[in-house]
Amino acid sequence: MPTKTRTYDPAKVRAALAGQTEALRGAVRGLTAAQLDLPTRLGDWRVRELVSHLGMVVSWVPAHLDEPLPEAPAITPLDWARRTRTAAATINDIAEELAAGPFAGTPAEVAAEFDRRCAELHAVLAGPAAAEAGRLIGMRFGPMPLADFLVTRLVETVVHADDLADALGTDFPHDWQAVAAATRLLADAFADQVPGGAVELRIPPYAVVQAVEGPRHTRGTPPNVVETDPLTWIRLATGRRAWPDAVEAAEVHAGGERSDLRGWLPVLG
């Protein structure tokens, strides 16, 4: 049975995205030339390519909001999660082009370009279009309700803010409503991609889902339980953290013969 698409409070999503992108603006403004050239955990990307990709992420809505919609059925955030791997090569090419173009300058110029894109997004989030019920936006996999698409932007900005923090060796001041939404969507994506009821995945305080084929738990203590914190789950679900390493570091507590999830991770490409 397909996982039911979770609903999110549109006003809270808009506020969380504004808060998360504002935190990103602060981080980008503080980057030095040496830091822009630091490697990241994302293949060949330096911090410059990572910031360039984030610039694309935050500018997608203002750039495409009024474009004609593709002639295809509307998709959900769970559809988006299933299909992200197919866009990896295109995303890489775009990041490299941006890093060699509008994000190729000095740290001040990079920050100014990122500021401009964030300001355009914030203007949309504060305007009437973002609150319009039923509004659709086109994206590479098909049209999506704008309110849902903004949730995918929360996932992107949380995941890549964590990538930035890792590259810089710092903590990141996430908007925790953004982290909550990212955690829930990635937990639901796991349950959607690995359907079943044999394992209860707990990510307090934001999400609990059942997944993995096998005997379904109905009452009492589940026989197979996995519990972790939100940021560890986000890293596992996106391939930033290996399952054995997280278990060894006690970042994940897994009990039961079906509780080893490494074969189904990551859920997002």
Image (tube, helix red, strand yellow):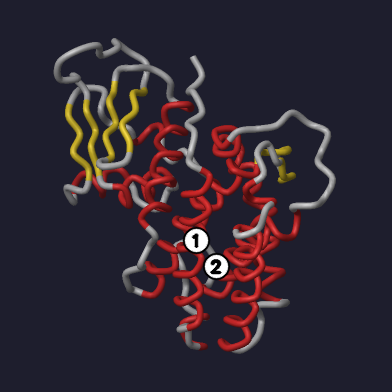
x and y, in percent, of residue 23 in the image = 44, 70
Q: CA distance from mark 2 to mark 1?
A: 8 Å
Q: Which mark is residue 132?
A: none
Question: Which residue is under mark 1?
Answer: 42
x and y, in percent, of residue 245 in the image = 26, 49
Task: Name the one closer to the observer, 47 or 153.
Answer: 153
x and y, in percent, of residue 238 in the image = 44, 47
Q: Is residue 219 above or below residue 70?
A: above
Image-based side of 161 in relation to 206, left or right: right
Residue type of the residue flagged with mark 2: Leu
Image-based side of 253 in relation to 131, left or right: left
Q: Which mark is residue 50?
A: 2
x and y, in percent, of residue 193 in the image = 48, 27
Q: Do residues under tags 2 and 1 come within 8 Å of each other at their CB atoms? A: yes
Q: What is the crowding at mark 2: few (fewer than 14 residues within 10 Å), some, or many (at least 20)? A: many
Q: Is residue 155 above or below residue 164?
A: above
Q: Secondary structure at mark 1?
A: loop
Q: Secondary structure at mark 2?
A: helix
Residue at image coords 33%, 36%: 207
Image-based side of 208 in relation to 152, left or right: left
Task: Name the one closer to the observer, 42 or 103.
Answer: 103
Earlier-in-chain disc, 2 versus 1: 1
- Give the mark count: 2
Residue at image coords 26%, 42%: 205
Task: Name the one closer to the observer, 148 or 221.
Answer: 148
Which residue reaches farthest front? 128
Residue at image coords 43%, 45%: 181
Q: What is the crowding at mark 1: few (fewer than 14 residues within 10 Å), some, or many (at least 20)? A: some
Q: Is residue 104 above or below residue 64?
A: below
